[in-house]
Amino acid sequence: MENELISKKELLELTGISYGQLYRWKRKNLIPEEWFVRKSTFTGQETFFPKENILARIDKIKGMKEDRSLDDIAGVFSPVFLQTALSAEEIIDRKIVSESTLHDYFENKDSTGVLSFQVLLALFVLERLLRSGDVGIEEARSAVRAMEDGYGKFEGKGCDLAIIRKNGISLALMIPGASPLHFEQGSKLIVRISLEKCVEELKMLA
């Protein structure tokens, strides 16, 4: 099913922002270029946006711009990883993930020393998958491995991690953010996570 879209006119009316603000935020990279979707209508070419994504993003910008510059906010929304490294103790203290998630991720691995932002993201996504209640530990680990292998191939663009299942067999997919997902009949979408949003949330915590 295609994501619901909202027109530019509806967006400006609903959020109370101006045309100038919208395009200034675009120039500052607060709103991704790919969210500006040009479509033909009976009145000509019009601009639409993925409704859920754009409304959530504008709400965040409004909440942050009182005490942050637009450049600082753009840094939060950027998919580029922070040069941050934390110990396991710091991760627990900051409530980034639980001890059980750390154990599940590092089973048969060395968790000593500091952990990079890439590892923090993997931990964060693993916990999100397990908390959904729809994914088992092996399924979640497999999905996180797919994310670790494929995230860099999106070259800094937003992407989602999805798990589909058919006849008890699951498959993890990396897809461009806000893109529709189509799969064969009999398959079921189990979970879909915006990695762009995970990076944003993680930057606020780390």
Image: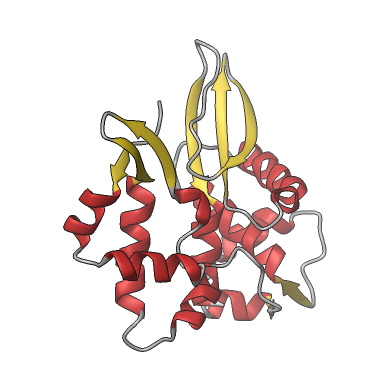
Q: Work out whether residue 198 or residue 119 is closer to the camera in this orientation and state it.
A: 198
The answer to whether residue 38 is above or below residue 105 is above
The answer to whether residue 183 is above or below residue 126 is above
Please tell me which residue is depicted at 45% across the width and 65% down the height of the picture.
Answer: 26
Residue 92 seen in this snapshot: yes
Q: Is residue 23 found left or right of 81 in the rendered image?
A: left
Please tell me which residue is depicted at 44% across the width and 80% down the height of the picture.
Answer: 70
The answer to whether residue 68 is above or below residue 17 is below
Please tell me which residue is depicted at 82% across the width and 65% down the height of the picture.
Answer: 110
Locate residue 113: give its quadrant. Answer: bottom right
Q: Work out whether residue 136 or residue 32 is closer to the camera in this orientation and state it.
A: 32
In what quadrant of the picture does the N terminus appear? Answer: top left
x and y, in percent, of residue 200 in the image: 51, 66
x and y, in percent, of residue 35 in the image: 45, 50
Residue 95 seen in this snapshot: no
x and y, in percent, of residue 193 in the image: 50, 46
Which residue, as the protein is rendered here, is positioned at the far bottom? 67
Please tell me which residue is depicted at 54% across the width and 80% down the height of the picture.
Answer: 93
Locate residue 17: give its quadrant. Answer: bottom left
Q: Work out whether residue 173 or residue 2 is closer to the camera in this orientation and state it.
A: 2
The answer to whether residue 203 is above or below residue 141 is below
- Colour treatment of the image: secondary structure
In what quadrant of the picture does the C terminus appear? Answer: bottom right
Locate residue 6: give its quadrant. Answer: top left
x and y, in percent, of residue 139 in the image: 63, 36
How many badges with numbers are in the image?
0
